[in-house]
Amino acid sequence: MKGVVLAGGSGSRLFPLTLVTNKHLLPVFDRPMIYHPLATLRRIGCREVMVVVGGRSVGDILELLHDGSDVGLHLTYRYQRGAFGIAHAIGLAKAFADDDPIAVVLGDNVLQDEGCLHDFAAAFVAGESEAGAVLTEVVDPTRFSVAEIGPDGVIVGFEEKPREPKSHLIPVGVYFFRPSVFEVIEGLRPSGRGELEITDLLNHYLQRKSLVHTVYRGQWQDAGTIESLLQANALAASFAADQPLDTRHDVAEVRPPVGESVRPLS
């Protein structure tokens, strides 16, 4: 499975912080925001990742990440020329994906994975469903795509940023697709705001009874507004506080210059 991080957009809800930089370069605790979705993809087993970029400061993203070797990934990039929607951005990964399934993570999401995502990704790859979505419950769902639940408890549709949401269940910005998704995207029509909506893509698979989902029980926070960015920082800080001081990372390496007393953990 290959990974895709969506890191375009103007970040207008984060003005004035994003007047001079891409929002995915803003700090979330001790690292740039974009490191968090990259870590999510690493945890579910992706090593080849495409970053879909857009807007300003694209060169700074490339300067930060380079080829991805510093974060244990092999990165490639595509540029989205305008606000054409999440589904359009996913469509830019067609050549990159080739015949492999893809895991898509929105670039402003912070998740603490407790095995749920890895297990769901493995089940999706082994199964036959064409699409998968990770959902969670939130207090105020009006900023998100919202799942509509039928009388039998089954998801019957998704609605984009409804004024009167029919549930509190939303996607957390982690999706899985077979390569057939690119043909589906080509058949989508722009919404009233001129975008190819992720809700229309998910609803297509619901109608085909080929969408599977899981409810995420770990901690999650988007970072797309000033308030939620502050909450994401607090959440990421709590993750770090839970890590033991001798935590080992399989992609860590010692680079000079270092002090004479520095030694690897035995």
Image (spheres, rainbow, N blue to C red):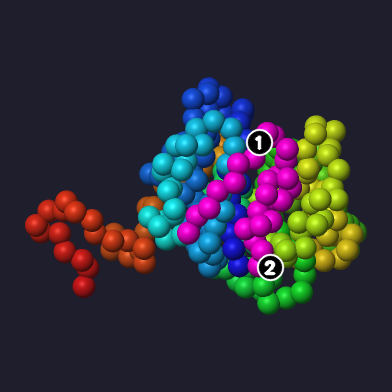
Residue drawn at (83%, 60%) of the image: 205
Given the current orientation, which residue lies at the most extreme left position? 260
The residue beneath circle 1 is 81
Q: Residues within 10 Å of mark 2 (few under 14, many from 20)?
A: few
Helix, strand or loop status at disc 2: loop
Q: Position of residue 128 (x, y in %)?
A: 76, 74
Q: Position of residue 242 (x, y in %)?
A: 39, 57
The quadrant the N terminus occupies is: bottom right
Q: For the residue marked with disc 2, what is the amino acid?
A: Asp
Q: Is residue 53 above or below residue 56?
A: below
The residue segment tinted magenta is: 74-100
* Residue 217 appears anywhere in the view: no
* Residue 186 appears anywhere in the view: yes
Helix, strand or loop status at disc 1: loop
Q: Nearer the viewer, residue 161 or 176?
A: 176
**Quarter where residue 15 is shown:** top right
Does 84 appear in magenta? yes
Q: Position of residue 232 (x, y in %)?
A: 51, 42
Residue drawn at (36%, 66%) of the image: 250
Q: Which of the two labelled residues, at mark 2 and mark 1, occupies the earlier sequence position? A: 1
The residue beneath circle 2 is 99
Q: For the residue marked with disc 1, what is the amino acid?
A: Arg
The quadrant the C terminus occupies is: bottom left
- Give the CA separation, mark 2 to mark 1: 25 Å
The answer to whether residue 263 is left or right of residue 75 is left
